[in-house]
Image (cartoon, rainbow, N blue to C red):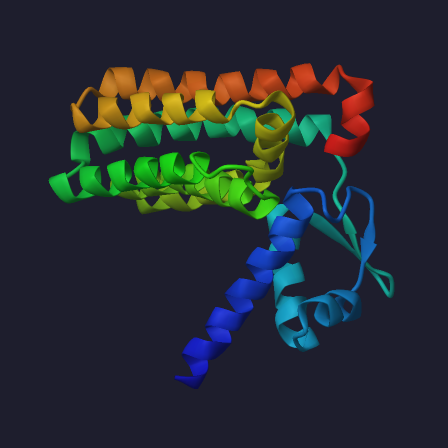
Amino acid sequence: MAKETKNTLRDSVYSALKAMIVTGQIPPGARVTESDIAAKLNVSRTPVREAFNRLERDGLVTGRPRQGYAVTEFDINMFREAFDIRELLDGHATELAAAAATEKDKARLRAMLAECERLAAIADRTTREKFQELEVGIDLHRVIAEISGNAMLHGMLCGILDKCQHYVWTELLWLDEWKIARDEHAEIVEAICAGDAKRAGALARAHVRGSRENVLRLRCRPNRITRAF
């Protein structure tokens, strides 16, 4: 029981800190320390230290000796590389999932779509509720990769998704792409459930390309980029 509680605390601290970074509550370039976050979240420094280690692997923060951590700023090269790899992995995982999905898998995917719709229907949504929808949408891709049955592919795609999450948040928030993302996810799931691997893979790749193009388009808006990245 003690180990389970410890793991729950570790994950909750990681999720809370990641949410603050992805949603811009802690802006790009900002310096953050273990003690500051521990005080803010009212926890010890140990789970905060572990969270920072995970976030550094995710590419969201960079450690600075004796200075804490700095929130990662937009890197165009890393962005292009991450989305190029994601398009390949996402497309292939979706094709495999369309061939392998069981009725239980299909029900799981449809339940995630329903959860996004539920969150979208909330009036005057808070940042937290919007972030919850983002997480469910990102997790949909993780689950599709899991359904593919290729464990290595699943692990690689999850790592890439961690690096893409703050870019996707920016796209959804500043370009108000929420409904488009939900509709595209629904089409992908529909193709998977129909066993149409070719269509499912094409839709997944187009979904990633569209997201990449939106972020690049947003980069051309200087008055927004300061706040977005």
Horizontal side of 223 relative to 5 (left or right) equals: right
Horizontal side of 74 relative to 59 (left or right) equals: right
Query: What percent of the width, then of the height, locates residue 43?
Result: 65, 75
Query: What percent of the width, then of the height, locates residue 206?
Result: 43, 16
Measuring 66% from the left and 53% from the top, which residue is drawn there? 56
Residue 74: which quarter of the image? top right
Query: What percent of the width, then of the height, locates residue 59?
Result: 65, 45
Residue 216 appears in view:
yes
In this rendering, the answer to whether 36 lies above or below 96 is: below
Residue 229 appears in view:
no
Measuring 42% from the left and 42% from the top, which residue is drawn there? 136
Return the residue nearer the eye: 208 or 17: 17
Measuring 81% from the left and 30% from the top, which residue is drawn there? 226
Return the residue nearer the eye: 35 or 126: 126
Horizontal side of 165 relative to 67 (left or right) equals: left
In this rendering, the answer to whether 165 lies above or below 225 is: below
Measuring 32% from the left and 46% from the top, which residue is drawn there? 151
Residue 15: which quarter of the image? bottom right
Query: What percent of the width, then of the height, locates residue 48?
Result: 66, 68
Tell me the quarter of the image containing the C terminus.
Answer: top right
